[in-house]
Image (spheres, grey):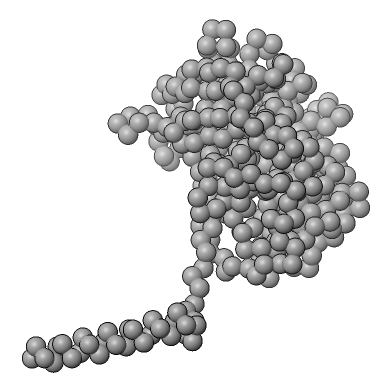
C-alpha cells in the first residue's frame, strides 16, 4: 500500500514539473489576472491592462514627482500638501517641475462639536500674506465612543465677495468621509467659522432641524459644500442638501442661508440639482444644473430679486448621472459648460469615449475615460473644442486627482504599487 501511494505521488510531481517547464518556457500561457484599481467613487473595479500607446503618458509629461502620499492642492496658489491617516501633514511649493518642502507657519489645536461629541484636531497651517490654508486629520482612538470617528479639517479664507465674512475669523470645513482623504475634490458636511485669537469655533449654518441618520450620527446630507462654493459666497452661503428625501436617495436640492424662525438656513431655491455646484454669477443671481422635465439636464438661474427659477438652456445629450463638475465648469453630453456664464463648447471627442474624470481651467479641458474599455487621457483647447492630446495606457486606470495647476499645466496623479507619481503635462 505504501509503495502504491509513493508511485502516485511521484507521478503527480512529474506532471507538475512538466507543466511548470512548459509555462516558464512560454509553450503554455496562463491567463493574466485583471488589475484591481480604485475608482473615483472608491469602489474597486476590474480592468484588463491596455496596450501601451505610441505616445506613452510618461514620455509625454513635462515633469513628474514620486511621493508616498498624493500631492494635493491647497487653497493658496502654488502650495500643495500631503496628509496621512496618522494626522501628519506636510506642505510643498511647486515650481519648475519640483515640489519643494516648505515649513508650516504654525499649528492650531481646534475643537468642534460633531453629532454632540467634542472632536479635537491639530491643524497645520501655512500663511502667505493674507492667504491662509490649513489641514488636519482627526481619527478617533479605538477605545473612543464618539459618533464621528473621522474628520478632515480644511482651514481657509472667506471668499472675496462674501458679505458675511468676518475679518477676525477663518472658514473651517470638516469632511467626515474617510474614503475622501486622498482625493483633491472633497465635500464637507460641517461648516464653522474659526477665531484663532480665542481658539473658538461657531457654526456657519444652523442645524436646528437636523435629524439623526441611520448610522446614529446627524445626517451627513443635511448641508454639504465644496471649497469652491465657499469661495464663491455672496449675500448668502449656498449649499446642497438631501434633507427633504430619504437618506439613501441620491437627490440634492440647492439651498441658501438666511431666513427666520424655524426656517433659518432652510430655504430651498433649486430642486433635483446635479453636478454638485451652485454659484453667484456676475449679475449676483444664482446658477446651477438640474434635472429638467424631460429627465435631461438644463442650466437654471435663480433670480434673487424676483425669487424665481428660470431655465436658461437645455444641455442636449446630457444625462443627469453623467455630469462631471470642476469648479464652475461642467462636462455633460460632450459639452463643456461654464455654469456661471452659460457658455458652451462642444468637444472633439474620440469616438466612443466614456469619461469619468474631468478637469478644466477655462482655457483647457481634460478627460480621463475609456474607449472600448481601454483607459485614455484626452485634452482639449476650449477656444474651439479641438483635441490636443490623446493618450492610452493601462496606468491611467489608476489616475486620481486630475486638475489644472495655477501654472496652466495639467496634473494627473497615478497610484502605484507603493506610493504615487504626479505627472505634469504642458
**Residue 383 located left or right of residue 261:** right
Q: Quadrant of residue 59?
A: bottom right
- What is the residue that sits farthest to the top in this orientation? 198
Image quarter where the N terminus lies is bottom left
Q: Is residue 49 left or right of residue 359?
A: left
* The residue positioned farthest toward the right in the image shown: 384
* Left or right of 263 in this view: 114: left
Q: Is residue 357 above or below residue 242?
A: below
Q: Position of residue 173 (x, y in %)?
A: 58, 27
* Figure disc tally: 0
The residue under the point 61% across, 51% down is: 414
Q: Nearer the viewer, residue 215 or 409?
A: 409
Q: Nearer the viewer, residue 351 or 223?
A: 351
Answer with left or right where residue 424 lies relative to residue 88.
right
At x 13%, y 92%, the residue is 4
Q: Is residue 12 visible?
A: yes
Q: Does 98 sit above or below residue 158?
A: below
Q: Residue at x 25, y 90 (%)?
A: 11
Task: Examine the rendered structure and indicate whether residue 354 appears above or below residue 132.
Answer: below
Residue in the foreground of this view, choosing between 94 and 125: 94
State the image coordinates of residue 179 (x, y, percent, origin top left). Answer: 51, 43
**Pick the front one: 306 or 240:** 240
Whether residue 254 can be seen here: no
Image location (x, y in percent) of residue 208: 53, 23
Q: Residue at x 61, y 59 (%)?
A: 395
Give x and y (percent) for residue 140.
Answer: 39, 31
Amino acid at each position: 500500500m505504501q509503495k502504491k501511494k509513493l508511485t502516485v505521488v511521484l507521478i503527480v510531481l512529474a506532471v507538475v514539473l512538466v507543466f511548470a517547464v512548459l509555462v516558464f518556457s512560454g509553450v503554455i500561457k496562463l491567463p493574466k489576472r485583471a488589475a484591481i484599481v480604485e475608482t473615483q467613487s472608491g469602489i474597486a473595479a476590474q480592468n484588463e491592462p491596455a496596450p501601451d500607446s505610441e505616445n506613452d503618458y510618461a514620455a509625454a509629461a513635462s515633469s513628474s514627482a514620486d511621493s508616498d502620499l498624493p500631492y494635493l492642492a491647497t487653497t493658496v496658489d502654488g502650495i500643495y500638501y500631503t496628509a496621512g491617516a496618522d494626522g501628519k501633514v506636510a506642505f510643498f511649493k511647486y515650481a519648475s517641475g519640483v515640489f519643494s518642502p516648505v515649513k508650516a507657519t504654525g499649528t492650531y489645536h481646534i475643537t468642534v462639536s460633531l453629532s454632540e461629541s467634542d472632536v479635537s484636531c491639530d491643524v497645520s497651517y501655512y500663511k502667505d500674506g493674507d492667504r491662509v490654508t490649513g489641514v488636519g486629520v482627526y481619527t478617533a482612538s479605538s477605545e473612543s465612543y464618539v459618533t464621528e470617528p473621522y474628520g478632515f479639517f480644511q482651514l481657509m479664507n472667506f471668499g472675496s465677495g462674501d458679505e458675511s465674512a468676518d475679518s477676525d475669523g477663518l472658514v473651517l470645513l470638516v469632511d467626515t468621509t474617510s474614503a475622501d482623504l486622498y482625493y483633491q475634490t472633497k465635500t464637507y458636511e460641517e461648516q464653522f467659522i474659526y477665531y484663532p485669537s480665542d481658539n473658538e469655533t461657531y457654526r456657519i449654518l444652523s442645524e436646528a432641524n437636523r435629524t439623526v441618520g441611520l448610522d446614529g450620527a446627524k445626517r451627513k446630507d443635511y448641508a454639504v459644500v465644496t471649497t469652491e462654493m465657499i469661495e464663491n459666497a455672496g449675500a448668502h452661503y449656498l449649499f446642497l442638501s438631501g434633507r427633504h428625501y430619504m437618506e439613501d436617495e441620491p437627490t440634492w436640492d440647492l439651498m441658501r442661508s438666511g431666513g427666520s424662525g424655524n426656517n433659518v438656513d432652510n430655504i430651498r431655491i433649486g430642486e433635483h440639482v446635479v453636478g454638485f455646484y451652485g454659484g453667484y454669477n456676475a449679475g449676483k443671481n444664482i446658477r446651477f444644473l438640474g434635472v429638467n422635465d424631460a429627465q435631461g439636464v438644463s442650466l437654471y438661474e435663480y433670480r434673487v430679486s424676483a425669487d424665481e427659477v428660470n431655465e436658461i438652456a437645455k444641455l442636449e445629450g446630457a444625462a443627469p448621472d453623467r455630469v462631471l463638475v470642476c469648479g464652475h465648469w461642467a462636462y455633460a453630453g460632450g459639452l463643456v459648460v461654464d455654469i456661471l456664464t452659460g457658455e458652451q463648447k462642444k468637444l472633439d471627442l474620440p469616438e466612443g469615449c466614456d469619461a469619468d474624470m474631468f478637469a478644466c481651467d477655462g482655457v483647457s479641458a481634460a478627460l480621463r475615460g475609456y474607449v472600448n474599455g481601454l483607459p485614455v487621457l484626452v485634452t482639449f483647447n476650449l477656444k474651439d473644442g479641438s483635441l490636443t492630446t490623446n493618450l492610452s495606457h493601462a496606468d491611467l486606470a489608476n489616475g486620481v486627482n486630475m486638475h489644472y495647476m495655477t501654472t496652466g499645466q495639467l496634473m494627473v496623479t497615478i497610484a502605484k504599487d507603493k506610493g504615487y507619481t504626479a505627472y505634469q503635462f504642458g
